[in-house]
């Protein structure tokens, strides 16, 4: 009997040890919903990792629109922190190196078996995932222990959206093209995710199929500790969406919804008048209508469309493209929006200095700077921030965001260029002021996914070559989710200058320069560090530089005695 008890005790201790080893944050056997640093293959989601003596198994899913294909290379492998690679042993549930078309569910689950990763390794990169060599970096081989003060559980039901297989989560105001996006799988019409955050603040959910089709609607909520329940419907019934369980979210949504309902009849009447003008071709001036007709007559892939769109943007951007009647309607629309919505929300933020008020204040500041074309006066909003919020929430993310917006509001011709911090290719911090000191400089903000930005960059190459020996330089900064995207674009476009990386908007550079909703922008700075031109075009920059420098004759000299026949 005593022997039996001893053996039984040894078995129990061994079992407890096994449980401890598998959950203590070290060399675990199972990692559920593994975390990672960057995902360069947004169609690929990791659900679980198993580590055994014979294999490291990745249980994953691929996600895309129904009837669209996904390809995963049979060269896919793991790479650890020492640079050692681990080959793929086999794949169950997915055919590699082939264009596999998605079913109606938009997702397929499978398992990848790799050589066993060394036991002392805490993370790996997944490399060479497809024909473009996409990579997922910093995949954690342990269950991350979270100590953040906010633990918000998101539980959702998705109704009548069979095409939606995942939903994107990111902070409100962030651009999913550049920020780190968390993709949450939707299984059998339901999703669940635990969001850990350092502070209570606003987030947004966006169906990924809408992102892929470039037409999306974001579901906003304020993350706070507890469980937040979402009921999300098809596009035609999204007014029936509901969010429960979050006190701050319910207040936040009710304030905005109430104001929108009050101004809705007036806005609809104006919209109907605008639609009528557009149908009668009285909304835009004749020159714009001619361009629009030309665009409509061309195939969608016709190269002429690009030039026409640029001409259209130039006309409309200068405010010269609309008829007088359209401008009057537009001004009335703006007046209603300002007095019945923006001003009311700003007043609410002044009277309620909790997280709901702070969320509304930062949203209105962002709206005024990025979307109102300087028609909204942002100074009273900054005053409310300084008087009521700055000292009350010194460490809140909103505080840093608004300070960046204050910097952006000061950007103008003749004003000093902000001294931003850049990351070089070795991960070191470099100050912009050090790079442009005593030089005329173009600060070129761009992204691999921004077509106009890259065209502007290529147009500036001959200008750079012409004036680089006269004290002109280019500081080029790419807004990316992964370094490889910048590297490939630089190689393809042939940029001759040094390029810096803004990864996942980590330094907030786009917000500081007031282009947070864009792929990029160009800013010309003089030798004293003041702006010569803001959000300028290559044409304007060339004219400024030509006036500053004596033209250089770059025509090759002829060899004496050898003429052309």
Image (tube, grey):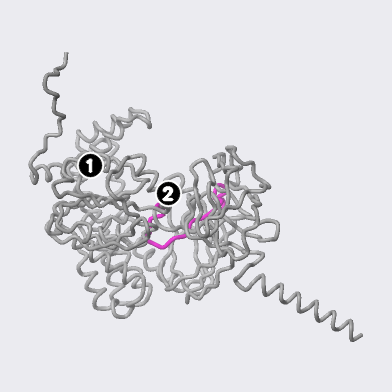
Residue 438 quadrant: bottom left
* Residue at x-position 89% and y-position 81%: 4
Residue in the foreground of this view, choosing between 552 and 133: 552
Q: Is residue 144 visible?
A: yes
Q: Is residue 273 left or right of residue 4?
A: left
* Residue stretch in magenta: 159-177
Please tell me which residue lies in front, 361 or 462.
Answer: 462
Helix, strand or loop for disc 2 = helix
Q: Tell me if residue 120 comes above or below residue 465 in the rendering.
A: below
- Specify whether residue 322 is in view: no
Callout 1 touching callout 2 (CB < 8 Å): no
Q: Main secondary structure of the magenta part?
A: loop
Q: Is residue 335 magenta?
A: no
Task: Answer left or right for 448 relative to 523.
Answer: right
Q: Which residue is mark 1?
A: 460
Residue at the image position 54 percent from the left and 62 percent from the top: 35
Q: Earlier in the sequence, mark 1 or mark 2?
A: 1
Secondary structure under badge 1?
Answer: helix
Query: Eyeballing the image, is 485 above or below 154?
Result: above
Which residue appears at 36% of the width and 69% of the height? Answer: 359
Label 2: which residue? 484
Percent of width and height locating residue 471: 15, 50
């Amino acid at each position: 009997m005593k022997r039996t008890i001893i053996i039984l005790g040894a078995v129990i201790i061994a079992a407890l040890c096994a449980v401890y080893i598998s959950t203590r944050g070290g060399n675990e056997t199972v990692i559920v919903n593994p975390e990672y640093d960057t995902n360069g293959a947004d169609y690929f989601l990791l659900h679980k990792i198993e580590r055994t003596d014979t294999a490291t198994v990745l249980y994953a899913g691929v996600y895309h629109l129904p009837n669209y294909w996904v390809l995963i290379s049979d060269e896919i492998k793991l790479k650890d922190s020492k640079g050692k690679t681990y080959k793929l042993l086999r794949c169950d549930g997915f055919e590699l190196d082939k264009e596999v078309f998605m079913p109606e569910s938009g997702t397929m689950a499978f398992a990848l078996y790799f050589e066993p990763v060394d036991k002392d390794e805490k993370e790996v990169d997944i490399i060479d995932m497809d024909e473009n060599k996409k990579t997922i970096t910093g995949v954690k081989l342990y269950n991350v222990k979270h100590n953040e003060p906010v633990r918000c559980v998101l539980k959702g039901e998705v109704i009548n959206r069979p095409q939606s297989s995942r939903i994107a989560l990111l902070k409100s105001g962030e651009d999913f093209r550049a920020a780190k996006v968390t993709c949450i799988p939707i299984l059998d019409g339901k999703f669940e995710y635990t969001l850990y955050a350092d502070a209570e603040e606003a987030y947004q959910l966006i169906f990924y199929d809408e992102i892929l089709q470039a037409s999306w609607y974001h579901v906003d909520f304020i993350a706070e500790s507890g469980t937040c329940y979402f009921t999300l419907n098809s596009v035609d019934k999204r007014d029936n969406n509901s969010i429960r369980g979050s006190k701050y979210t319910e207040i936040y949504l009710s304030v905005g919804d109430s104001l929108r309902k009050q101004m809705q009849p007036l806005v609809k009447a104006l919209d109907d008048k605008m639609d009528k003008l557009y149908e009668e071709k009285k909304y835009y001036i004749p020159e714009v209508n001619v361009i629009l007709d030309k665009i409509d007559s061309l195939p969608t892939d016709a190269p002429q469309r690009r030039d026409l769109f640029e001409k259209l943007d130039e006309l409309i951007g200068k405010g010269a493209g609309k008829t007088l009647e359209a401008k009057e309607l537009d001004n009335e629309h703006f007046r209603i929006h300002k007095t019945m919505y923006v001003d009311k929300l700003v007043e609410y933020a002044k009277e309620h200095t909790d997280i709901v008020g702070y969320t509304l204040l930062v949203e209105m500041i962002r709206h005024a700077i990025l979307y109102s074309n300087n028609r909204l006066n942002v100074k009273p909003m900054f005053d409310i921030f300084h008087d009521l919020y700055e000292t009350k929430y010194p460490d809140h993310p909103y505080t840093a965001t608004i300070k960046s917006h204050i910097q952006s509001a000061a950007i103008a011709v003749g004003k000093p260029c902000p001294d931003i911090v850049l990351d070089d290719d070795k991960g070191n911090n470099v100050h912009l002021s050090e790079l442009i000191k005593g030089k005329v400089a173009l600060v070129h903000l761009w992204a691999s996914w921004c077509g106009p930005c890259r065209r502007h960059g290529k147009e500036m190459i001959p200008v750079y070559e012409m004036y680089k020996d006269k004290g002109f330089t280019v500081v080029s900064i790419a807004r990316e989710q992964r370094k490889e995207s910048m590297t490939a674009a630089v190689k393809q476009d042939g940029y001759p200058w040094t390029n810096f990386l803004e990864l996942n908007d980590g330094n907030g550079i786009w917000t500081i320069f007031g282009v947070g909703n864009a792929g990029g922008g160009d800013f010309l700075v003089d030798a004293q560090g003041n702006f010569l031109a803001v959000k300028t075009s290559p044409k304007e920059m060339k004219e400024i530089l030509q006036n500053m420098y004596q033209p250089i004759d770059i025509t090759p000299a002829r060899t004496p005695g050898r003429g052309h026949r």
